[in-house]
Amino acid sequence: MRILHIITRLAHGGTEKNVLNAIEWEISNGHESHLAVGTTGSAPVRVAQISHQCPVHAVPGLQRSVRPGGDRTAVANLEKLIRLGGFDVVYTHQSKAGILGRAAAARTRCTRVHGVHMPSFGRGYNPVLSRIFQTAERLYGSATYRFVFVGYELRDRYVRAGIVSRERSRVIRSPIDISTFSAVREMDGEDRRRARSLYGFTSMDRILLSVGALEPRKRHQLLLRRLAPILRRHRVHLVIAGEGQERSALERQASTLQIQNHVSLIGHADRVEDLMAIADVYVHSASVEGVPQVAIQALAAGVPIVATDVCGLREVPSASVTVVHPSGRDMGLAVLRALRPDARARPVNLDALVDWQPTSVGRELRRFYEELSDVTAKARVGLPAS
């Protein structure tokens, strides 16, 4: 099959990792993959990583914000690309690219698939934009052959909203190398001291870790505000790994809260497992998620989690997860409890994470692409999809 993936931007987030994994799987299994990506907000390094594997098409006008003029330009450019490319499948990702990509494909014969990595409407969004995207999802949902969700709670939200039926939905987890993170459990005291020393910490420090882009959806400002009291009063340090537009604002907030000496903004980290090796507790405060990939990584590493309530958390193994109110109230108290010496002694059983293993995800991908191959073969000879 000739497959065109469409994404608004290519950065370092979980969605992008999922898309790149799908592309790698497609190529290794004999499919021809292309990627269409917006011209703003994409990291050149990420584009360079796949340009030798599949053609990358820059799409003027394709961007995250809603701008009618630019959106019309993006749809026109995408439709031209789809027609010239003769693609069998158009596979869209992210809320904005999902709408524009399917609009561009509407007058073509290609099979449309939409990957949902997090909700595009509901809590955590501007109410007006939420209604716009929910309406658009309903409009294009009926013409979408399959929706592919990273989690069941996320799927159920779209089913309840009348966007898609369960029969036209698939749940395929985000692949995570569980063994890489579970190796952290086997580290002895000397290994951990050595890992901490690389970041300037000692075995006496208590380290809280958060990983994610520095953008409003991740709510790092809420994290600083809720954790400030324990950062000031206890020997506790917060490490935030990620890059983005909010870095300066977070630095100013830390200074205002008088916790600047207890917060480290270390930028993007390629090896999250190294950070899990120094962490006592993982803290999560995002307002919108599908299933937080980093939560699965923390569980595999045996690191307790304290998180504000968000979509997807209810379906991860809960033995080491403390969920607090979406406002973050009582987060500080929950963190202090998780820092107790016996908290790490009850890690989740690794068997509970098998669905996220690359081999398990690969089996699901194979079943799904076999279905797509059958559908596209029928489309070429004018037969209806079953």
Image (tube, rainbow, N blue to C red):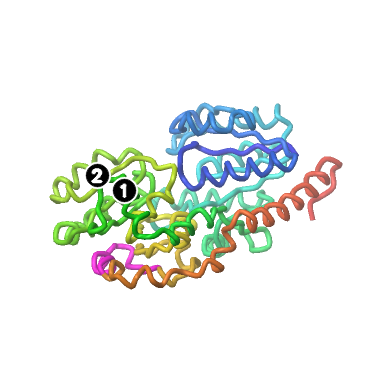
Residue 218 at x, y percent in the picture: 36, 50
* 325 and 60: which is toward the camera: 325
**Label 1 near label 2: C-beta < 8 Å?**
yes
Residue labelled with disc 1? 240
Q: Is residue 213 magenta?
A: no
Dot 2 or dot 1, earlier in sequence: 1
**Quick one: SS at disc 1?**
strand
Residue 141 at x, y percent in the picture: 61, 52
Residue 151 at x, y percent in the picture: 55, 60
Q: Is residue 314 left or right of residue 232?
A: right
Residue in the picture at 65% in, 37% down: 4
* 274 and 240: which is toward the camera: 274
Depth check, mark 2 against mark 1: the one in front is 1
Residue 51 at x, y percent in the picture: 59, 29
Q: Is residue 374 left or right of residue 273?
A: right
What's the magenta region?
321-336
All told, the count of numbered labels is: 2
Quadrant in the rendering for residue 108: top right
Q: Quarter of the image containing the N terminus?
A: top right
Q: Is residue 334 magenta?
A: yes
Q: Residues within 10 Å of mark 1 (few under 14, many from 20)?
A: many
Q: What numbered label is drawn on residue 44? A: none
Quadrant in the rendering for residue 3: top right
Amino acid carrying mark 2 in the image? Leu
Amino acid carrying mark 1 in the image? Ile
Q: CA distance from mark 2 to mark 1?
A: 10 Å
Q: Residues within 10 Å of mark 2 (few under 14, many from 20)?
A: some
**Quick one: SS at disc 2?**
helix
Residue labelled with disc 2? 250
- 186 shown above or below 114: below
